[in-house]
Amino acid sequence: MGITQQEALDLFNSDDLIGIGMAANEVRRKKTDPRVATYQIDRNINYTNFCTEYCSFCAFYRPLGSKEGYILSFEEIYKKIEEMLELGGTGVLMQGGLHPDLHIDYYEKLLSSIRERYPQVHLHCFSAPEIICIAEVSHLSIRDTIARLAEAGLVSIPGGGAEILDDEIRHRISRLKCTADEWEDVHRTAHSLGMRTTATMMFGCGEEYRHRVNHFERLRRIQEDTGGFTSFIPWMFAPDNTPLGKRIPEATAVEYLKTLAISRLYLDNIDHIQSSWLTPGIKVCQVGLQFGADDVGSILIEENVVYAAGVRNRTNEAELRRMISDAGYIPAQRDTLYRAYFLK
C-alpha cells in the first residue's frame, strides 16, 4: 500500500530530500529489475499546431487562420516515420492541437495508412483532450471514438493534457480544456476496451502541494480499478514564451527530484516511473534514477511543444545509454509497452 495523502504532503514539506529519494529508490528496486534502466527510441509527431484551447502554459499552438499554423500532409508524416525507423525506432507518439475541422474519418485514414505502410510501428497517439475533441466534432461517444481509432490502428494513448488533475488549477491555466473528470473518463474508457495508456503530470505551473497530491490520488484510484497505466511521467512546466511563465517562479531541480520520488512512493500500483531529461536536463535525469525512476524516456528525435517554450535540451541513443551506465545501471531499449530488450 502506498503512502497516504497526508504523508505525501508531509514529504513535500520536508527538507530531507536524500531520505525521500532513498525511500523511493527502495520501492523502485522491489518493483523493477534493480540492475536495469530502460529507454525508448520513438518519435513525437505534432501533426498540427492549430488549436482552439489557448492554454496559458503553451507556446506551441496557433489560432485558426494563423499564417504560422500548419497541418502536416500524410507524406510528411510518412517521411518522419521513415527517419525514425532508420534510427532503430519502434513507435510514434502523435499529438497535435485541437482542430475543429478534423473529424474521425481524417484520423482513421491517417492511422490505417500508417499501419498499412509500417505495420511494425506502435501507434501511441492522441491525448485525452484530442480524443474528446474528435468525439465532439464527429458527434460520437468517447467509447465509440476510441473503438474506431483502435480499429484503424491506434494501440495506446499518451497521458498528455493532464497537466494538474485538479479543476481549481485547470480553470486557472487551461479553462477551455477538458476537466479532470473528462480526462479520467477517456483513460478509464480506453482501459475498459483493453488499451494501455500512460499517466503524466506537468507541475510547477502555480499549483500547491495539495494539488499535486490530488493528482496522484486520482491516478492511483484509476489504476486500482483498471490496471491500465503502463507508467507515470512527471515533468516541469517550461515557462519561456508563455503567458503563464511571466507570472510564476520556475520549478527547481530539487523540486523535480522530490516530486519524482514522492510519485514513486504514492503510485505504488504503477510499475514504471520515468525520469525526464527534456526539461530538467541530462544530469538531473541521471540523478532521478536514484530517486525512484527506472526509465529515462525517449531520445525524442523531434520535439516541438516545449521547444517552442525555450527548451533546447537534445540527446541521442548513445548519450542515453552512457547516462544510464554512468548512473550504475545496465541500459536496455524498450518499446512503448515497456517490453525491454538488451542491446550490445
Image (tube, rainbow, N blue to C red):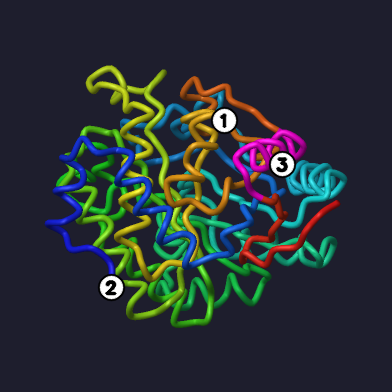
What's the residue type where badge 2 is placed?
Met
Looking at the image, tell me whether mark 2 or mark 1 is earlier in sequence order.
2
- First to last magenta residue range: 316-329
Q: Does the magenta stretch include residue 124?
A: no
Residue 321's disc number: 3
Q: Percent x, y for residue 16?
A: 24, 38
Q: Dot 3: within a 10 Å radius of its alpha carbon, few (fewer than 14), some, or many (20 or more) residues? A: many
> Which secondary structure dominates the residues rendered in magenta?
helix
Q: Is disc 1 in contact with disc 3, using a CB cutoff of under 8 Å?
A: no
User: At x 38% / y 29%, what residue is drawn?
Assistant: 253
Circle 2: element type = loop
* Left or right, 1 with reference to 172: right
Q: Is residue 325 magenta?
A: yes
Q: Percent x, y for residue 288?
A: 47, 41
Residue 1's disc number: 2
Pick the residue in front: 27 or 186. 27
According to the image, label 1 marks what residue?
Answer: 282
User: At x 53% / y 56%, what residue is drawn?
Assistant: 126
